[in-house]
Amino acid sequence: MSWSNTLKGELPNEKLLLLPRGFEVIGDIAILNLLPSLSDEKHLIAQTLVSHSKNIKVVLLKKNKLAGEKRIAEFEILIGDRTTTLHRENGCVFHVDIAKTYFSGKMYFERDRIVQKVNDGEDVLVLFCGVGPFLIPIRKKKDVRIIGLDNNPAACLLFRKNAEQNNIEAEIILGDANSVGAIFKKKFDRIVIPTPYGQDRFLNLARPLLKPGGTVHFYTFKKDFEIPHFKRLLEEMGWDIDYYRDCGCVAPRVSRYVFDLKEK
Ligand SMILES: C[S@@+](CC[C@H](N)C(=O)[O-])C[C@H]1O[C@@H](n2cnc3c(N)ncnc32)[C@H](O)[C@@H]1O
């Protein structure tokens, strides 16, 4: 049953039409993104949601878009008393604090694709590592050395906790990706760059850290018509594009794309 059906009879038809198509669930927390015109109904909507889904214990209302370097939003707690939860993904468990760290479960499939690409023995770096959703499954399933870098202290602390929870070893660096050249003295077989919006320059900054024959998984936000030009640009910069794909829409006409790159 669609979730708007569960609200039939509770809300007038004109309000039902204003409901979003869905909502994100992280662990046992549902995140609602409602139009201001539904603000009088927000508690009723949250209550109905919880009474129809026994796995949801907390309902948060997103108050604004993801903002700032940390990519976090403000939330109003509609049901429950916390913004922390335990989220399961790709055979691992993640402590997440939605109010303090970026996390989205929508990328689980893509993160698993990367796990499948990694070979035993590799040195793997993830810039903008957050609470560890790329690296922890990689280390859990492959015999590799992993390093994550993020400039959000809360994300690094949760990454540390998640590494312990999943019984894996990880090096976690609290630092600014703008200084990768100064931070890292070693090179990597694989670098994953889930680039923040509009900051494609990190591909060039990280390039000197790649071992010969190494692979970069570069994430970037683009409109579909920008892709042919961006592919040409990558090739001009000396990259071979092994693979690329649209990983899902993030805003009207804007998608997150991944490019698997090797140096020519
Ligand atoms: C879009 S999130 C990606 C998080 C993680 N990879 C994930 O998928 O959950 C961006 C992350 O980059 C971090 N960040 C943003 N700018 C940074 C910078 N200049 N240096 C290091 N980390 C940064 C933020 O703190 C945030 O955790």
Image (cartoon, grey):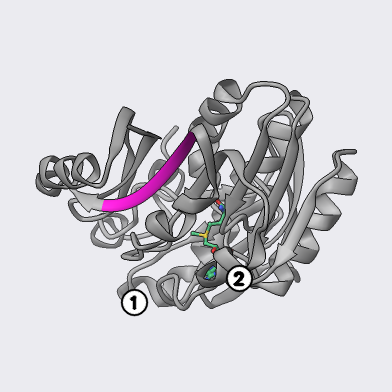
Disc 1 marks which amino acid? Answer: Pro
The residue stretch that appears in magenta? 214-221
- Find residue 174 and report its horizontal and vertical position in percent: 71, 69
Q: Position of residue 257 (x, y in %)?
A: 32, 42
What residue is disc 1 on? 36
Residue 15 in picture, x, y percent from top left: 29, 62
Residue 68, compared with residue 221, is above or below; it is below
Q: Is residue 82 above or below residue 187?
A: below
Instruction: Give the residue at x 54% y 50%.
Output: 209
Q: What residue is rendered at 68% in x and 32% in y?
A: 138
Looking at the picture, tell me which residue is in the foreground, 56 or 137: 137
Whether residue 62 is visible: yes
Residue 86, horizontal then vertical, whole percent: 76, 49
Neighbour class for label 1 at 10 Å: few (<14), some, many (≥20)?
A: few
Mark 2: which amino acid? Leu
Q: Residues within 10 Å of mark 2 (few under 14, many from 20)?
A: some
Q: Which residue is mark 2?
A: 78
